[in-house]
Image: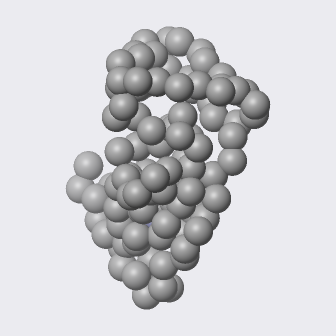
Amino acid sequence: MKIKNFTCLQCGAADFERREGTRVACAYCHSLYEVPEKYFANLGNVIINKGAKVTFGKHSDVIINGSLEIESGAAVEFLGKITLLEKSSDETIEIAKKKLKRISEEN
Ligand SMILES: [Zn+2]
């Protein structure tokens, strides 16, 4: 899953795996983050179309029972807080960074 406007603070990856509760782990270096419930993209059916500009404010309370699809080109800002719970080892982060670099070079 992707979290709009949030990349892993450790390795810069934009891909996360859902863990228990409101936790997600970086798909590359496995650093663990606690994110607000409203960030989860696979629970509802809200689609934010290309060209839309949506801001979820600091105190917004957004509950989506379906999927949240954000088309590329839509500007969506999350102002809530994401907390890093568990930092991966520096070695794992380095490997993840190298992996990411390789992917971006291939594209
Ligand atoms: Zn990472």
> From what the image shows, is residue 87 above or below residue 8?
below
Q: Is residue 74 shown above or below 42?
A: above
The number of numbered discs placed on residues in the rendered structure image is 0
Q: Viewed as shown, does residue 107 lie left or right of 66?
A: left
* Image side of residue 92 versus residue 79, left or right: left
Residue at coordinates 28% horizontally, 59% vertically from top-left? Answer: 103
* Residue 19 visible within the image: yes
Residue 7 drawn above or below residue 75 = below
In this rendered view, identify the residue nearer to me: 52 or 102. 52
Give the quarter of the figure containing the N terminus: top left
Q: In the picture provided, is 23 more to the left or to the right than 67?
A: right
Q: Which sits in the foreground, 105 or 49?
A: 49
Q: Position of residue 50 (x, y in %)?
A: 43, 14
Q: Nearer the viewer, residue 28 or 83?
A: 83
- The residue located at (55%, 74%) in the rendering is 86
Residue 52 placed where, x, y %?
53, 12
Q: Residue at x 36, y 66 (%)?
A: 28
Residue at image x 50%, y 50%?
Answer: 22
Question: Residue 87, percent across and down?
Answer: 54, 76
Q: Quadrant of residue 53?
A: top right
Q: Residue furthest left?
A: 106
Residue 98, image x and y in percent? 36, 73
Q: Nearer the viewer, residue 106 or 49?
A: 49
Residue 69 in view: no
The quadrant of the rendered image in which ligand 1 is seen is bottom left
